[in-house]
Image (cartoon, rainbow, N blue to C red):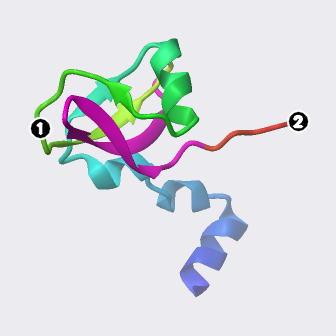
């Protein structure tokens, strides 16, 4: 905790943070178009050709990490969402 406090004071804390998706780097990456991305953001399963049972890192067309999904019966089923919707 002291080390993190010092990093915060020094302005170097950001360097200690790793991207969330790096934890899931062993899963293949799938990038979706805007239409499919919107469905995933709303928790809707999407039809997508993928290896049955395989887990995937799912991104929108802008490279934003949305979720981890698994291929089940020709659909990508969301396992965990990391999408944050900002409403201003």
Q: Is residue 54 left or right of residue 18?
A: left
Q: Is there a contact, CB below 8 Å, between mark 1 and mark 2?
A: no
Q: Which residue is tagged 1?
A: 52
Q: Is residue 18 above or below residue 52?
A: below
Q: Position of residue 16 (x, y in %)?
A: 49, 61
State whether the magenta stretch is mostly helix, strand or loop: strand
Q: Is residue 9 above or below residue 71?
A: below
Residue lying farthest to the right in this orientation: 88
Q: Position of residue 4 (x, y in %)?
A: 58, 75
x 59%, y 62%: residue: 13
Q: Is residue 34 left or right of residue 53?
A: right
Residue lying farthest to the front in this orientation: 73
Q: Position of residue 7 (x, y in %)?
A: 61, 69
Specify few, some or many for label 2: CA neighbours under 10 Å numbering under 14, 14-19, or 20 or more.
few
Query: Along the line of sight, which residue is nearer the eye, 73 or 84?
Result: 73
Q: Quadrant of the N terminus?
A: bottom right
Specify few, some or many for label 1: CA neighbours under 10 Å numbering under 14, 14-19, or 20 or more.
few
Q: How many marks?
A: 2
Q: Nearer the viewer, mark 1 or mark 2?
A: 1
Q: Is residue 86 left or right of residue 36?
A: right
Query: Along the line of sight, which residue is nearer the eye, 2 or 31?
Result: 31
Q: Which residue is tagged 2?
A: 88
Q: Which residues are magenta?
A: 63-83
Badge number at residue 14:
none
Is-magenta flag for residue 40?
no
Q: Position of residue 10 (x, y in %)?
A: 67, 64
Q: Quadrant of residue 83?
A: top right
Residue lying farthest to the bottom in this orientation: 2
x 56%, y 24%: residue: 38
């Amino acid at each position: 905790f002291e080390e993190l406090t010092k990093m915060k004071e020094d302005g170097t804390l950001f360097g200690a943070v790793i991207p969330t998706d790096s934890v899931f780097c062993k899963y293949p990456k799938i990038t979706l178009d805007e239409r499919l991305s919107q469905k995933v953001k709303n928790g809707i399963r999407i039809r997508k050709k993928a290896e049955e049972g395989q887990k995937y890192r799912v991104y929108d067309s802008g490279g934003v990490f949305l979720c981890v999904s698994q291929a089940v019966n020709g659909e990508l089923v969301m396992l965990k969402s990391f999408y944050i919707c900002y409403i201003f």
